[in-house]
């Protein structure tokens, strides 16, 4: 198995597990609190790694600016995704976000000048179409085709931003180590999340900060434990992702990592009682077929 595919799938496994935790947490305390809490944990962990390894802050302003930009994109990506998981079916929203892998392939070719074999290009296309099918519902004919959940709009925003994150990370790795990149980016993520919580989460009309009346706050021990676990999963996934980008094509690592929501879908169906329509199962088959094609040199 190509190393880039292996590291991407490793990231997918950790991120897919993370998605289940954050989806359930978002429905209890709101997506904004979950985003800020998880990213705060991630920032602390990367700061600890930064200090323990003796890393230094980049000296080039352009490098720092690129890491800050990654942090801004990441803040929007995670908040959009977790909001989609809060308001839409986990299986549908996660399937839609998987499309960021297909968009990453396109951006890698257009922006980074990478190339694919004909079979790999076919696999990427099949996987992307499969992802789109998981997000659609066909009720009474083609004219009644619609997105299969209210969270899909947020998922569309998230998939674009996650693709931009992959490309930006790849560009940043040319001048910085992943420790430097993620430490700066995650501090920016956490700062934005905390400020957003202070400004929005307490407003009764804020959907992003909504939580059920009488429900637990994010200081509840179980919520804290879930956020810490989510932060650890995110860090391991990011490290695997960056390691792959350092040695393999961006399109391969990004597309493999986008398989993470498929893990979420399987958990949602197996343990959370969610059900997929036949066309959505067909979409998952397309994703799997595309991944097999990509793995063939």
Image: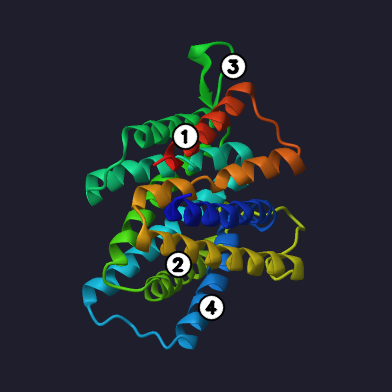
Identify the mark at residue 44; answer none if there is no mark: 4
Q: Which residue is mark 3?
A: 139
Determine the residue located farthest toward the top in the rendered image.
141
N-term-proximal mark, 3 vs 2: 3
For marks 2 and 4, give the one nearer the viewer.
Answer: 4
Instruction: Quadrant for residue 233, please give it.
Output: bottom right
N-term-proximal mark, 1 vs 3: 3
Residue 153 at x, y percent in the picture: 48, 38
N-term-proximal mark, 1 vs 4: 4
Identify the mark at residue 189; answer none if there is no mark: 2
Give the CA distance from mark 3 to mark 4: 47 Å
Name which residue lies at 66% across and 29% down: 276
- Relative placement, left or right, of 185 versus 52 is left
N-term-proximal mark, 2 vs 1: 2
For marks 3 and 4, give the one nearer the viewer.
Answer: 4
Name which residue lies at 34% across and 43% down: 105
């Amino acid at each position: 198995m190509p190393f880039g595919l292996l590291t991407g799938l490793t990231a997918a496994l950790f991120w897919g597990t993370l998605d289940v935790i954050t989806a359930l947490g978002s429905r209890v305390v709101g997506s904004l609190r979950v985003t800020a809490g998880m990213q705060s944990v991630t920032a602390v962990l990367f700061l600890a790694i930064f200090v323990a390894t003796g890393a230094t802050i980049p000296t080039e302003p352009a490098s720092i600016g690129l890491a800050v930009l990654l942090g801004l994109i990441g803040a929007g990506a995670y908040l959009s995704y977790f909001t989609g998981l809060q308001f839409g079916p986990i299986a549908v929203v996660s399937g839609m976000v998987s499309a960021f892998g297909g968009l990453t392939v396109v951006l890698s070719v257009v922006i980074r000048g990478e190339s694919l074999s004909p079979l790999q290009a076919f696999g990427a296309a099949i996987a992307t179409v499969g992802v789109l099918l998981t997000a659609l519902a066909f009720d009474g004919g083609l004219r009644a085709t619609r997105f299969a959940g209210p969270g899909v709009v947020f998922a569309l925003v998230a998939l674009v931003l996650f693709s931009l994150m992959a490309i930006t990370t790849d560009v940043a790795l040319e001048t910085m180590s992943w420790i430097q990149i993620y430490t700066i980016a995650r501090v920016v993520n956490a700062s934005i999340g905390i400020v957003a919580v202070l400004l929005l989460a307490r407003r009764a009309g804020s959907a992003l900060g909504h939580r059920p009346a009488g429900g637990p706050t994010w200081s509840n021990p179980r919520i804290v434990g879930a956020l810490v676990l989510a932060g650890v999963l995110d860090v391991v996934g990011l490290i695997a992702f960056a390691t792959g980008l350092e040695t393999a094509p961006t399109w391969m690592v990004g597309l493999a990592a986008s398989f993470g929501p498929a893990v979420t879908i399987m958990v949602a169906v197996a343990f959370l009682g969610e059900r997929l329509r036949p066309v959505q199962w067909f979409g998952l088959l397309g994703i799997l077929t595309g991944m097999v094609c990509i793995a063939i040199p």
